[in-house]
Amino acid sequence: MKNIQQTLEQITSLIYTDTVEASRLLTQVANDVMDCDDSDIKGLYHNLLGIIAYLKNDISRSLNQYLIADSYLKTSKLWKNRIKPQVNIAMLYSKTNQDFLALDVYMDIVEQLKDIPMEITHAQMYINIDTIYYNIHDYAKGSMYAKKAYEIATLLNHDFGIALSASNLAGHLLHLGEMDDARKYLLVSTSLAENNFENLLCSIYYKLAKVHLHQKDYIMTFEYLDKGIPITQKYNNKYELYEYYLIYAQLYEEMGNDKLALEKYKLFHQFRDEWVNDEKIKTYNQLQLQYETEKKEVRLKDLKIKQQESELTALKAQMNPHFIFNTLNSIQSLYMKGLQDIANEQMGNFSLLTRKILEASGKQEIALSEELEILIKYLELESIRFDQTFHYSIQISPDIDDDYIKIPPMLIQPYIENSIKHGLFHKTGSKELNVVFEICEEENLLYCTIHDNGIGRVAANEINKRRMNHSSFATSATEKRLQLLNDVYESKFSVSYEDKYDEYDKASGTNVVLKIPI
């Protein structure tokens, strides 16, 4: 496990500087990641796959990997891991001009961070939010978040955070006409950026030139234009480069030099057209993203709720009041008959079953051996209700390693409960239930077949029709859960039913076959 973590950390440090090597290492570690049980490792792995896809301009794949990463990391005990894919999803939206979607994600992250001790991450989120508000021209709200970021960075004495947030805040103030305050923050930003953060000067010098042009200080305007353009060209920042030439043209126009103003306007249009072409590519990516991932986005918003509902309904299916009351009544009856040893044993089984179910309910998957332990305890408790007329068996194919195979928890018991409740409960005489586990290596599926010798589905349905508002909660909840698992993971979970008849064509039970991907 430690080696996988170290490799992922190495990939993280390489991913922007040597993408080819990072991709090679990700491929090399893929099998180890898939075999491990650590959700954080799986989430971080898919997050890195998302970054690689984004760097290759594969927008759809990038988003899909971030969504998978989020599904693993959303329950991480480490808050920094929890927000990593969410930040990347928001950045992806922002880069493809989907500002309001990005804003929603950033706001959700801020809500998650409200109880976390103050760190520079808080300032980073506020800077991201202020950038979104700048893009949608809501400078008043943008300045509010930029100022929050500035205050946090100043409190933490974080130079880059101070320089960036001060520059962003000044950008909002310029649009709000507050030139003196804008200049004050720009000078703070300049003093830090000139020594350590040259790339920030592209924006800072442009804003200072704009302030001085507004104040008709033409000498200082020239100075900042001449200092800013070479740095902006160095970093190929086309948006700010065309803004520089617009200020240049306006400067010469105010000075009455129409010839030079025209030259600068031509350069302004040249660089603006180049930037517009880049934006067209962004727009194409945005349309591609919207077309290919619209359903994925709906699933992203619904997935948390649906998974929680699925887990709760599965838990409810196993811990329904009828089972609890029937079990406790049966145990009480044993005490009343003087069978204290048996009653104590069954009370222990009930306590253990309850604990096992609650433990399993918080997991995405458990070992088949754990599921079998839950089923055995459940069947032992059910058997005390039938005065020794109920017999069960569980058979496992010898080629199955029940400690290695993982399945979603609480998946099988509702179907067993259904066989007992509707098939065997109404049957007279010996009641037989046999659960068989087999593996199909070709399809990579685990087959769980539940055989009962009950009254059959036709007779059971006739009885159920006479019961008002009857619905098989356990089965319907589990089948919805199977559908959700198939939708989310594109798997092959399925359930099928076979009615059994004897030689006289009389119903002799039901077979239920569950197919579970492994």
Image (cartoon, helix red, strand yellow):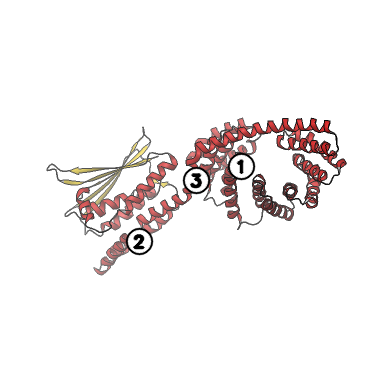
Q: Is residue 261 left or right of residue 444?
A: right
Locate the N terminus by quadrant. Answer: top right
Whether pointer 3 and pointer 1 mark residues with C-beta atoms closer than 8 Å, the reply is: no
Q: How crowded is mark 3: few (under 14 residues within 10 Å), some or many (20 or more)?
A: some
Q: Which mark is residue 354?
A: none
- Give the residue drawn at x 37%, y 49%: 371
Q: Name the residue under label 2.
A: 348
Front residue (pair 209, 375): 209
Query: Which residue: 44% across, 50% down?
Result: 306
Viewport quadrant of the C terminus: top left
Please tell me whether mark 3 sits on a helix, a strand or a loop: helix
Residue type at the position of mark 1: Ser
Q: Image height check: is 60 above or below 132?
A: above
Disc 2 residue type (three-letter): Gly
Label 3 vs label 2: CA separation?
Answer: 41 Å
- Looking at the rendered structure, the number of numbered marks drawn on it comes to 3
Q: What distance separates the C-alpha of mark 2 from that of mark 1?
A: 56 Å
Residue 158's x, y, as percent?
Answer: 73, 50
Query: Which circle's residue, 3 or 2, is located before the other in the chain?
Result: 3
At label 1, counting other C-alpha atoms closer than 10 Å, the crowd grade (few under 14, some 14-19, many 20 or more) is: many
* Left or right of 497 in this view: 352: right
Q: Mark 1 points at which residue?
A: 94
- Residue 405 visible in rendering: no
Camera-nearest residue between 498 and 132: 132
Residue type for callout 3: Leu
Name the mark on residue 300: 3
Q: Which of 321 and 289 is in front in this view?
A: 289
* SS at badge 1: helix
Front disc: 2 or 1: 1
Mark 3 or 1: the one toward you: 1
Q: Can you give x and y, in whole percent of width and height, for residue 436 in the image?
A: 29, 43
